[in-house]
């Protein structure tokens, strides 16, 4: 049955989605409005009363927004992977499609004020917020929101980077920067309680923002803070607000409209409930104000227009049903009216001519069925409660109400004469009421066991035909009141609305089992046309009757889900369909035959789509092809493990890989069975094609091949660049890649990834070669357009649900493409980021069929497509012009020539045509192939899959895997042979000749000449074969089949000499015994090995005992011992010919003299198995004839060579790629000259030359950690072993006890609590009088520089007197002349790396990367200290290196994740261009070449990598080190560059390696005597600076010429004794130096003078902090074993001393004469003002936590980790310290101590969050202080006065330190968040208000005010920094 000639055209949509949505009605510039219902967006002209429809969505639209130009519209749908369409409201053409980043549904969207960006938010549990550059289809930022449902989003006017979102109990203010979205939550100043739900948001003037709330208030926000509230703006929720040029309009649940000025001054109120509408409880969900009109959308699905000048007379523009399913539909029998009923309990009467609701009636329950009487004067209504209500029409007055069964009525039908009403119920009953008897005593028909779904009367009213839910059909007779089997006489159905029956079988697809999927049908019996509605949102047209399953149809879309009912109107010119849950009513015009809709050309409407011609069978080859699964159980990338295994104690060093190597020599095969148009001539006259994972370049004259081998899985498609110098190949994969590669060099140019799934089946270059189009194998066959050089996706779109075979650019066009596939051809147009298509219109010019290939006329006006029926279809635009019969079978290839075309088909012929396909010029047949070799017989029909023309010859690739050459004379020659589709497992080398045989599932036996690289035998087999073996004499050949049979052939002519079968399953291996071929061993999957005698081939024994299938068999040289492997990891041995199983000791296996070794098990093969692995991972092995090497093939496509035996686990090897997936077999040929390998699914046979090559040939699988290197350095080892996971905020720095934090105790404190000295444990603090309070802090200076684990992180800025570097969480800009510092403070954790953009366009742009679980890179301006971009979402753990490219546009970053992944960013917009997983060993630095945006080098632990940016991938070049240089790979620490591709890398041994490209050219030995940590390239003059670690301890820096042959040395030891240089920078005769100990120095190149810029502590936690009692001096003590004094006013280090133990605490004597320092080893050092030791105390081995001098200076208290406090008497003059007493057994370790003013009591704070008091000097302990206690200082974080300083975030975060100002009611704290805070003192209210200051990276371990409160000093634990804050005193 053909597709119906009639068609539908969508005429009108009734309804509007007002429920669950808001702000979804908008005005357009044209004066039209746009809204949505179901899956359709409606553009409605209220003046002309016309609709246009956008119906590309596949599910309910739930959000809508308009562009600032009021022309472009964005609509978002619901669904698991929802799509956003952006389209032109004038043309209805798609401008862009956005998908792949949201789930559940798009709840809100907004365009930015410029219109360039689109923000969207979804309905996921944790809503995802995205910002797109929508024209390019590019996501710029993505953020997962930890909030409840989001309702609205708005961009700030004139600022595309500022966005506001609001929703359930939140409002958030966002800043878009780079690829990040920074959130700031809305703050409610001076308002307590939880923020209420914000329903909508709108911007006012300047910074003002207004949000409508659930309670009816409107909030006024400014700068992210709530500044005012307009209470009761509405008396219910404010659902919508809109800003226009006229002002702001708001609408709410109360049904009122309020108009406001732009600053929210009320202008007027419009209450719709008191207008002419008179509607109560009118809930307004959407509002838009445009000029003099306001349009609102209501929850009850109405759209109302209000004229501002005549507010009392609003008019309804659109109406529809509201929430609840809609099932009821009836059309009037005589007029153009129809009625609908819904679960909203209403009946609506619609005028189909005027497109309006004429009446609305409310019923008592949900309306489920409707029916008109024959005269149209009564309307029967079926309700959910079972009542049948009869209404007068059109008055809609109740005539009667009939009580039914109590179950819902699903169907009602009047009999043709109107004398009966039949009602079908949910319980399966049918009640028939007589209208003539007043509806009394209805007839009851039983028999159905499920709900009644459909009913029809016979034309005479005698019979009732019924359908029920479970595929039940029955006929009831009215006269007999009973069920009957069939009708009698001429009775026939008066209507046909049943979905089950013989006449409508075809409305269901083939094999469809659920009959409930089609919900409704109506039939025009005159026109023989049926319309249906189904559960998939489809309305379909069928010819009637449609009794053939899977009948052809036309499909129409627009409904979002199930279409519940369809009906023709009385004239049959209109069809009505209703949607169940979408609440939409669609009105369709019906056009019969070839009638054309008025005003429309004869084209397929956008909603008209022919169904699949499912009654026409696909060509058998195509059927197989479309069924191929490209999913892999495992992919090759799954084998990538973390290399660099650490050598544990006692680990054994693995022996090296074999010295020999393999070189891929030749590959037999061509991918033809599922590919086409994939063979071409290159510019060099080579033939390029593909098989397995290889791109192959074949020189037919010399019969040689070259290979592109960078793919990781099967290549499926190939395209040639118009210049014929580049090729593009697409592969299979989880994230399949497209490689664009240079044909001459076989090098990668670009890799395109991240857009396809399963595989890429077609690629094509545009005519100018700038664009590349690709098609994926995902369910939607996504089409992607690439700017391939940049790796940029320009556009993507769903291609087709059916398989696409080919995609081609039109000749001379960069905008037009054609795709062909299963039963379709589509014509695509690219506009911006949008791809739109028109389906090919066949009309009467040809029959629709599957299209396989296409080409174009020279001008591109005509398209030629090849059909599966052998016809060439000629298209003029999307319309078929004509067809030409070209082949007898499918046409797989069309190729355009300079003049004319060539086609190739399944019939094995190649045809040459003229320019118009009017004349067949020449025809060639592959069946004419003849050869002098009688054994090389081919299948006479070789289906053509690819054609290439060049040098006067035609090259043909066939489905059977062969490549032929056709000369002009017609002579056909085989160039390359191959196997066809089916796995290749059988491989057998000849024992005496360079010949081997293969068998395959393609049912062929092939014999190959390895020396000549030719196919010498092709023999057809009857069934699939899996094994093959030559006899030892070479006279016989055995073939084992999948059926369990075996054939024996003589090799003289390969005729059959014997055949036998004793097994049912696959014959997996065959082996002739070495004793004159006496026996043949036959292994099978039946778990047995059968032994046959030769030459009679009688079975002599069966080897039993294996518990699984047999995989391999091997004989010993005597022929009496057989070794087998099984799938159960068994190695079994048998005595032959007895067949008896014999035990063999493990130690004896290797001592046996084995004739062959193909075993993959046994101890000798231990090392060939990767870890971890499965028993099936290694498929094959073969030991070379000399017994030294074992070759293996595995499931990941690798061929490997190991030394044999491989006794040690994870033995080193050489591995080779080329096969795509599992390598099924490997065999050495005679004399080990070649290794032959077979690929399972890739069908290829590969020939590898085995040569005496150096170990550099082949890729070694050894991890970098196993690379032996020269040298060791403790600093390098320390840096590489740092665990950064321990350095984030995840844990408190201090180990605490089991106590309860002050804020978590049950005691409640309030601001009004009075301190009663007799009842409180709190204490007063003695403070000096001060005229000013401390109210704020300003960071003045930071003593710090991160050098111990960072490098290359000091740079000169454009102003050469300024440098930039980092410390803690800061970027620091320092003026070298004034020493003033400026700070970039936006980081949230330690900054680990820094780079400065050197391009003039980006002056003083700095990038800094930080530590963190979600690490990020911040790009900022060093002049303004403002963030310009944030790069996040890729790295984890931290970013350890960053660097800008030469153009300044790109940035590379490397992370601290397990594989040290690298990313390249376009930093301005935050786009991540490419990524790569690097190595499990630490990457220390990465840098672009100074002259490149694509070439970069990374160095690190035992490696250096040379990288190239290739599209969306970063590819590395193999490093080559010649043995003649006498060096090994070393840990590389630094990198510098010269011209002509020269790279310098500094090594751990002090040498510099000089690289030419990626080859080591020379070694500069002993540049330094220790590791070369830093190299710097001066761009202006090319000079290089080096620095590192000297074994002498005397630190030097060297300046080198460009070739690093001459140098000048600058000693810097005087300023940095024992220093290690970690960073260098140079400009105009000045070198800056950063050291590992935290110093920053400069060296004058002329004078050699060294200046100190920054000094700080080195690596280690800083805990000790003390301030001088009378001077602006602070002392710090660190675990780096140093004590330092800092002049806070002058910002310089006054002195420093190195001590023997880590220092933990410090305190000055009250007169400043002594400084006490407590140490980790339990000692206390007493130092003089010049830091000379004057006394030493060590009475404990436990670390000293706190030292504190008493105010009178007579006692020193020492608190230790062992819960003790020791008191020492002090005599400063004589520097005598004598222990007085020790207070032991305190509840916890000591963390702080404070003396009383009178020096008699010591308040000791403990780790258990307790304070104890110790009497001095007695040492008595007390838990409560005396009532009159007055403390001299307060450094404790405990006590009632400090409850408010503890944060609420989490109990695991501690406040580490506090300091009460000396003369102010202020306390400063430092905590584990890295923040310094100021609180009012006392702070007794929990979670008190405070001011926060940032800069420290993590834990702030100490804070102290100076003696006069002018400065606050803070120290960072692990950031090793000292911050000096200036107070506002």
Image (spheres, helix red, strand yellow):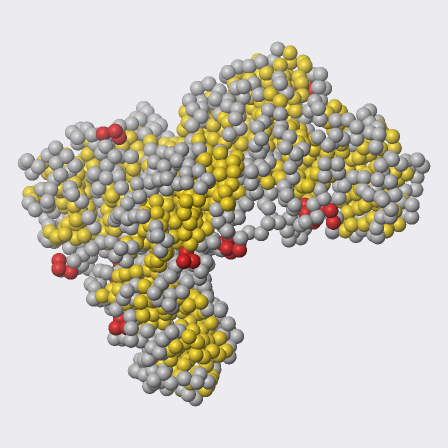
Report the residue at 61% width, 13% height from top: 308
Report the residue at 19% width, 34% height from top: 1356
Name the residue at the right extreme.
437
Q: Is residue 1459 above or below residue 652?
A: above
Front-most of residues 1450 and 392: 392
Q: Position of residue 1154 (x, y in %)?
A: 32, 80
Q: As drawn, is 279 to the left or to the right of 836?
A: right
Q: Is residue 529 above or below residue 618?
A: above
Front-most of residues 1647 and 101: 101
Name the residue at the top extreme.
309
Counting every numbered tag in the picture gives: 0
The reply to whether residue 1110 is visible in this rendering is no
Q: Position of residue 1437 (x, y in %)?
A: 35, 48
**Which of the 4 image quarters holds residue 251?**
top right
Question: Which quadrant is home to the C terminus?
Answer: top left
Q: Is residue 31 above or below residue 1320?
A: above
**Which of the 4 image quarters holds residue 1643?**
top left
Q: Position of residue 968 (x, y in %)?
A: 34, 50
Report the residue at 53% width, 55% height from top: 620
Q: Position of residue 494 (x, y in %)?
A: 81, 39
Q: As drawn, is 1381 to the left or to the right of 85?
A: left
The reply to whether residue 394 is visible in this rendering is yes
Question: Which quadrant is home to the N terminus?
Answer: top right
Report the residue at 5% width, 36% height from top: 1647
């Amino acid at each position: 049955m053909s597709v119906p000639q009639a068609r539908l055209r969508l005429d009108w949509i009734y309804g509007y989605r007002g429920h669950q949505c808001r702000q979804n009605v908008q005005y357009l510039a044209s004066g039209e409005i746009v809204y949505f219902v179901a899956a359709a967006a409606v553009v409605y002209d209220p003046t002309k009363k016309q609709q246009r429809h956008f119906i590309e969505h596949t599910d309910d639209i739930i959000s809508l927004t308009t562009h600032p130009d009021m022309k472009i519209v964005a609509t978002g749908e619901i669904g698991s992977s929802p799509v956003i369409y952006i389209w032109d409201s004038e043309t209805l053409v798609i401008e862009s499609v956005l998908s792949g980043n949201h789930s559940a549904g798009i709840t809100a969207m907004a365009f930015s004020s410029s219109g360039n960006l689109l923000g969207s938010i979804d309905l996921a549990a944790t809503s995802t917020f995205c910002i797109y550059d929508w024209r390019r289809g590019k996501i710029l930022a993505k953020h997962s929101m930890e909030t409840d449902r989001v309702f609205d989003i708005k961009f700030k006017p004139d600022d595309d980077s500022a966005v506001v979102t609001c929703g359930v109990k939140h409002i958030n203010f966002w800043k878009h920067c780079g690829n990040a979205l920074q959130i700031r939550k809305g703050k409610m100043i001076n308002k307590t309680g939880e923020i209420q739900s914000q329903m909508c948001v709108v911007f006012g003037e300047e910074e003002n923002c207004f949000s409508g709330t659930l309670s009816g208030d409107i909030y006024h926000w400014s700068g992210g803070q709530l500044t005012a509230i307009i209470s009761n703006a509405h008396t219910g929720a404010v659902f919508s607000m809109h800003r226009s040029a006229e002002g702001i309009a708001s609408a709410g649940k109360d049904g009122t409209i309020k108009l406001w000025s732009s600053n929210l001054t009320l202008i007027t109120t419009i209450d719709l409930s008191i207008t002419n509408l008179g509607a109560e409880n009118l809930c307004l969900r959407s509002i838009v104000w445009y000029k003099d009109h306001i349009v609102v959308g209501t929850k009850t699905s109405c759209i109302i227009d209000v004229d501002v000048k005549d507010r009392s007379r609003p008019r309804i523009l659109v109406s529809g049903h509201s929430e609840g399913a809609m099932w009821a539909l009836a059309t009037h029998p005589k007029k153009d009216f129809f009625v609908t009923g819904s679960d909203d309990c209403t009946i609506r009467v619609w005028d189909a001519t005027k497109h309006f609701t004429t009446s609305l009636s409310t019923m008592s329950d949900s309306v489920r069925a409707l029916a008109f009487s024959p005269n149209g004067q009564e309307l029967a209504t079926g309700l959910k409660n079972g009542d049948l209500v009869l209404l007068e029409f059109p008055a809609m007055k109740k005539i009667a109400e009939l009580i039914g069964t109590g179950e819902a009525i699903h169907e009602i039908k009047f009999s043709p004469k109107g004398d009966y009403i039949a009602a079908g119920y949910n319980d399966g009953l049918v009640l028939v009421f007589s209208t003539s008897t007043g509806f009394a005593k209805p007839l009851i028909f039983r028999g159905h066991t499920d709900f009644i779904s459909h009913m029809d009367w016979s034309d005479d009213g005698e019979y009732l035909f019924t359908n029920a839910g479970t595929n039940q059909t029955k006929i009831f007779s009215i006269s007999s009141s009973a069920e009957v089997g069939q009708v009698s006489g001429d009775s026939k159905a008066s209507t046909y609305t049943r979905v089950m029956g013989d006449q409508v079988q075809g409305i269901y697809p083939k094999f469809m089992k659920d009959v409930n999927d089609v919900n409704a049908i109506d039939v025009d019996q005159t026109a023989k046309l049926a319309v249906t509605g189904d559960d998939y949102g489809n309305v379909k047209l069928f010819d009637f009757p449609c009794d053939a399953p899977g009948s052809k149809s036309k499909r129409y879309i627009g409904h979002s889900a199930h279409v519940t009912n369809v009906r023709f109107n009385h004239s049959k010119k209109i069809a009505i369909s209703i949607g169940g849950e979408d609440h939409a009513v669609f009105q369709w015009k019906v056009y019969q035959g070839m009638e054309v809709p008025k005003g429309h050309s004869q084209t397929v409407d956008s909603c008209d789509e022919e169904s699949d011609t499912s009654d026409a069978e696909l060509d058998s080859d195509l059927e197989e092809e479309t069924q191929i699964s490209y999913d892999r159980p495992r992919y090759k990338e799954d084998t990538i493990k973390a290399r660099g295994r650490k050598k544990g104690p006692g680990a054994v060093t693995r022996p090296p890989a074999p010295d020999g190597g393999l070189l891929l020599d030749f590959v037999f095969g061509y991918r033809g069975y599922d590919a086409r148009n994939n063979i071409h001539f290159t510019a060099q006259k080579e033939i390029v094609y593909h098989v397995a994972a290889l791109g192959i370049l074949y020189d037919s004259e010399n019969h040689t091949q070259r290979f592109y081998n960078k793919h990781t899985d099967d290549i499926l498609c190939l395209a040639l660049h118009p210049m014929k110098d580049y090729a593009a190949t697409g592969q299979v994969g989880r994230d399949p890649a497209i490689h664009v590669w240079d044909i001459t060099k076989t090098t990668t140019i670009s890799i395109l990834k991240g857009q396809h799934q399963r595989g890429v089946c077609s690629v094509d270059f545009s005519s100018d070669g700038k664009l590349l189009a690709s098609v994926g194998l995902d369910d939607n066959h996504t089409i992607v357009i690439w700017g391939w050089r940049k790796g940029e996706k320009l556009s993507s779109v769903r291609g087709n649900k059916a398989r696409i075979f080919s995609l081609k650019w039109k000749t001379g066009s960069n905008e037009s493409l054609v795709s062909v596939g299963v039963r379709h051809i589509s014509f695509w147009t690219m506009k911006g980021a949008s791809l739109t298509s028109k389906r090919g219109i066949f009309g009467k010019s040809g029959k629709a069929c599957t299209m396989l290939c296409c080409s174009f006329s020279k001008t591109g006006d005509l398209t030629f497509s090849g059909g599966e029926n052998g016809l060439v279809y000629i298209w003029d635009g999307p319309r078929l012009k004509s067809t030409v019969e070209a082949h007898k079978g499918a046409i797989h290839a069309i190729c355009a020539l300079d003049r004319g075309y060539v086609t190739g088909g399944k019939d094995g012929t190649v045809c040459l045509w003229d320019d118009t396909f009017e004349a067949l010029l020449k025809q060639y047949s592959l069946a004419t192939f003849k050869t002098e070799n009688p054994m090389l017989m081919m299948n006479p029909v070789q289906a053509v899959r690819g054609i290439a023309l060049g040098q006067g010859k035609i090259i043909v690739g066939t489905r059977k895997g062969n490549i032929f050459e056709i000369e002009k004379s017609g002579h056909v020659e085989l160039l390359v042979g191959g196997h066809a589709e089916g796995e290749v497992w059988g491989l057998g080398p000849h024992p005496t000749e360079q010949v081997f045989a293969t068998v395959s599932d393609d049912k062929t036996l092939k014999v190959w000449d390895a020396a000549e690289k030719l196919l010498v035998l092709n023999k057809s087999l009857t069934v699939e074969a899996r094994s093959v073996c030559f006899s030892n004499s070479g006279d016989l050949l055995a073939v084992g089949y999948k059926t369990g049979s075996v054939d024996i052939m003589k090799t003289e002519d390969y005729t059959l000499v014997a055949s036998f079968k004793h097994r049912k399953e696959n014959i997996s291996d065959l082996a002739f015994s070495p004793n004159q071929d006496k026996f043949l061993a036959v292994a099978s999957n039946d778990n047995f090995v059968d032994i046959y005698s030769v030459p009679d081939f009688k079975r002599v024994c069966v080897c039993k005992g294996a518990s699984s299938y047999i995989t391999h068999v091997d004989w010993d040289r005597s022929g009496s011992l057989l070794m087998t492997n099984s799938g159960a990891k068994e190695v079994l041995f048998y005595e032959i010919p007895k067949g008896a199983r014999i035990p063999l000791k493990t130690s004896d296996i290797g001592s046996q003299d084995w004739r062959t070794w193909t075993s993959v098990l046994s101890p000798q093969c231990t090392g060939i198995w990767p870890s971890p692995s499965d028993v099936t991972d290694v498929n094959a092995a073969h030991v070379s004839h000399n017994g030294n090497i074992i070759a293996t093939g595995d499931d990941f496509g690798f061929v490997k060579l190991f030394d044999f035996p491989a006794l040690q686990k994870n033995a080193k090897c050489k591995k080779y790629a080329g096969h795509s997936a599992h390598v099924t077999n490997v065999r050495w040929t005679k004399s080990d000259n070649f290794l032959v390998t077979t690929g399972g699914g890739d069908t290829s046979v590969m020939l590898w030359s085995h040569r005496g090559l150096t170990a550099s040939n082949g890729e070694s699988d050894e991890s970098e950690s196993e690379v032996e290197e020269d040298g060791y350095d403790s600093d390098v080892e320390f840096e590489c072993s740092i665990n950064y996971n321990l350095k984030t905020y995840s844990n408190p720095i201090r180990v605490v006890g089991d106590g309860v934090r002050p804020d978590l105790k049950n005691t409640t404190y309030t601001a009004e609590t009075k301190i009663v000295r007799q009842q409180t444990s709190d204490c007063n603090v003695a403070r000096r009088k001060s005229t000013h309070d401390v109210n704020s802090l300003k960071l003045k200076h930071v003593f710090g520089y991160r050098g111990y684990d960072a490098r290359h992180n000091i740079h000169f800025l454009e102003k050469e007197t300024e440098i930039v570097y980092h410390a803690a969480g800061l970027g620091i800009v320092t003026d070298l002349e004034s020493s003033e510092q400026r700070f970039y403070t936006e980081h949230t954790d330690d900054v680990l790396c820094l780079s400065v953009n050197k391009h003039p366009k980006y002056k003083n742009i700095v990038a800094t990367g930080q530590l963190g679980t979600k690490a990020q890179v911040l790009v900022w301006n060093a002049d303004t200290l403002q963030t310009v971009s944030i790069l996040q979402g890729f790295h984890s753990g931290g970013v350890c290196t960053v660097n800008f490219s030469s153009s300044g546009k790109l940035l590379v970053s490397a992370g601290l994740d397990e594989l040290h992944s690298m990313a390249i960013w376009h930093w301005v917009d935050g786009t991540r261009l490419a990524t790569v997983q690097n190595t499990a060993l630490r990457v220390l630095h990465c840098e672009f070449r100074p002259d490149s945006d694509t070439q970069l080098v990374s160095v690190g632990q035992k490696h250096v990598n040379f990288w190239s940016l290739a599209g969306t991938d970063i590819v590395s070049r193999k490093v080559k080190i010649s043995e003649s240089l006498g060096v090994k790979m070393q840990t590389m620490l630094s990198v510098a560059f010269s011209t002509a591709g020269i790279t310098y890398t500094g090594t751990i041994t002090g040498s510099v390696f000089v690289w030419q490209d990626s080859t080591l050219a020379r070694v500069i030995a002993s540049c330094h005597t220790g590791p070369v940590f830093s190299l710097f390239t001066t761009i202006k003059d090319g000079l290089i600076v080096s620095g590192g670690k000297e074994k002498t301890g005397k630190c030097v820096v060297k300046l080198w010429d460009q070739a690093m042959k001459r140098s000048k040395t600058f000693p810097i030891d005087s300023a940095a004794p024992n220093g290690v240089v970690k960073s260098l920078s140079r400009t105009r005769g000045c070198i800056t130096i950063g050291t590992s100990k935290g110093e920053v120095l400069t060296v004058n190149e002329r004078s050699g003078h060294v200046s100190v810029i920054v000094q700080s502590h080195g690596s280690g936690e800083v805990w000790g902090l003390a301030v001088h009692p009378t001077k602006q001096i602070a002392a710090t003590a660190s675990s780096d074993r140093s004590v330092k004094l800092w002049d806070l006013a002058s910002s310089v280090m006054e002195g420093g001393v190195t001590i023997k133990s880590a220092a933990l605490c410090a305190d000055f004597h009250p007169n400043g004469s002594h400084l006490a320092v407590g140490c980790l080893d339990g000692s206390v050092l007493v130092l003089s003002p010049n830091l000379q030791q004057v006394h030493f105390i060590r009475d404990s081995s436990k670390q000293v936590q706190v030292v504190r001098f008493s105010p009178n200076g007579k006692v020193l208290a020492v608190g230790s980790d062992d819960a003790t406090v020791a008191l020492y008497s002090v005599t400063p003059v004589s520097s005598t310290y004598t222990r007085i007493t020790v207070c032991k057994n305190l509840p916890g370790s000591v963390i702080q101590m404070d003396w009383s003013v009178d020096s008699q009591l010591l308040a000791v704070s403990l780790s258990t969050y307790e304070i104890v008091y110790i009497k001095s000097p007695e040492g008595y302990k007390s838990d409560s202080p005396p009532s009159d206690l007055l403390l001299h200082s307060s450094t404790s974080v405990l006590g009632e006065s400090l409850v408010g300083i503890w944060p609420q975030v989490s109990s695991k975060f501690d406040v580490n330190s506090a300091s009460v100002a000396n003369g102010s009611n202020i306390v400063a704290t430092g905590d584990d968040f890295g923040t310094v805070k100021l609180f009012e003192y006392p702070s007794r209210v929990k979670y008190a208000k405070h001011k926060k200051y940032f800069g420290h990276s993590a834990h702030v371990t100490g804070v102290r005010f100076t003696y006069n409160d002018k400065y606050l000093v803070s120290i960072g634990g692990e950031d090793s920094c000292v911050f000096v804050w200036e107070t506002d005193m």
